[in-house]
Amino acid sequence: MKAVELNGFEGLSSLQVVDVEQPTPGANEVLLEVKAAGLNFAEIEMTKGKYPAGKKLPFVMGFEAAGVVVDAGAQAKNVKVGDRVTAIVSSGGYAEYATADAGFAIPIPDGVSFAEATTIPIHGVAAYALLKLAAKPQPNESLLIQAAGGGVGLYLVQLAKILGVKKVIALASSTEKTDLVTSLGVDVAINYSHANWADQVREATDGKGVDVVLEAASGDVGAESFKLAAPFGRIVMFGAKNIHDTISSAQIRQLVYQNQSLVGFNIPTQRAEQIADCIPDLLTWIAQGKLKLFANSSFALADVKAAFEALSSRRTIGKVVLIP
């Protein structure tokens, strides 16, 4: 079968489309005929050796995929051949076929495309778990969301309003994206490519600062967002860019003198039940039309480098997918 393999850590040049043996599902696994595979920023960092791969080179890339079950192990439960599912995969999703733990195969709701379904296992679960387990915003609080037009961001802006957050402030990189998140219900949408974006955030909070800052951007935007936290506020750091960051002495002083909390977040793989607990709500809200899914950019498997370049450019909206 055709697959995208990573054979080094020199960036996108280390990606190759190759022929590999089709994987065989284990006793508790299913085999998917992949219809769409989702790209993530963490995988860009992985090609550079800046994100833990957990596998020996060379290996098939891809955290997640959506497709049709074509085979199942003897102990696989609640999933049968012919089911449309999406999942975090074990064998690599940038391929024509991939294996996944049957226990974490998520049924694709009616009316949801395979491309849209790839947003659920990582972006959807991460966004909901981030809010539910780490940020814990209260109805009377304000919340700052960076990269609101991206895959995780589009979930965050919608979930925050579903959870009843009083004031959701969204940062995005273009008018097209600020218009989109406004249509999804955010209270304030700000184009962070404008020099005065931080002042606009302060104005939106009447100079008080933001109660909860979701910080994934790193760099100048991340540092400025850090400063926007209100006294007794919470700063939640997540995403592939932040794992190599350090906290400055000025930021430590801010945390202490402003009585703020700094929280780290990653999808809680150590406690699988916390992931599972997020899925029913997500599927219900999707089925009810409260959660809209966005996967507006698709590329052929052979065009994987172009797909990653599109994702890196931040010109895309929502999920970027590969179609085998």
Image: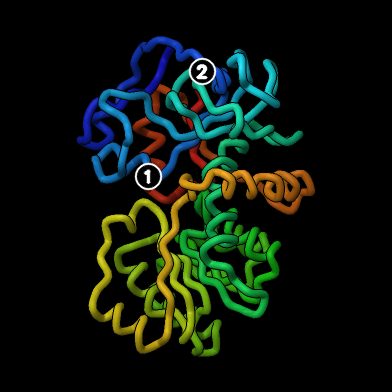
In front here: 121 or 274?
274
Residue at 25% from the left image edge and 65% from the top image edge: 246
In front here: 22 or 273?
273
Q: Which colour scheme appears in the figure?
A: rainbow
Question: Where residue 298 sits in the image (x, y, percent)?
Answer: 51, 33
Disc 1 to disc 2, C-alpha distance:
27 Å
Classify mark 2: residues with Cα within 10 Å, few (<14), some (14-19) or many (20+). Answer: some
Residue at 45% from the left image edge and 38% from the top image edge: 39
Rendered view: 162 above or below 297: below
Question: Where residue 64 sits in the image (x, y, percent)?
Answer: 50, 34
Question: Where residue 200 sits in the image (x, y, percent)?
Answer: 48, 80
Q: What mark, if any, has residue 26 been given in the picture? A: 2
Amino acid beneath label 1 = Ala
Nearer to us: label 1 or label 2? 2
Q: What mark, if any, has residue 42 been given in the picture? A: 1
250 to the left or right of 309: left
Helix, strand or loop status at disc 2: loop
Residue at 52% from the left image edge and 79% from the top image edge: 211
- Tag count in the figure? 2
Amino acid beneath label 2 = Gly
Residue at 49% from the left image edge and 62% from the top image edge: 172
Question: Where residue 223 sits in the image (x, y, percent)?
Answer: 33, 72
- Which of the two labelled residues, at mark 1 and mark 2, occupies the earlier sequence position? 2
Residue 80 falls in image quadrant = top right
The image quadrant where one finds the N terminus is top left
159 to the left or right of 310: right
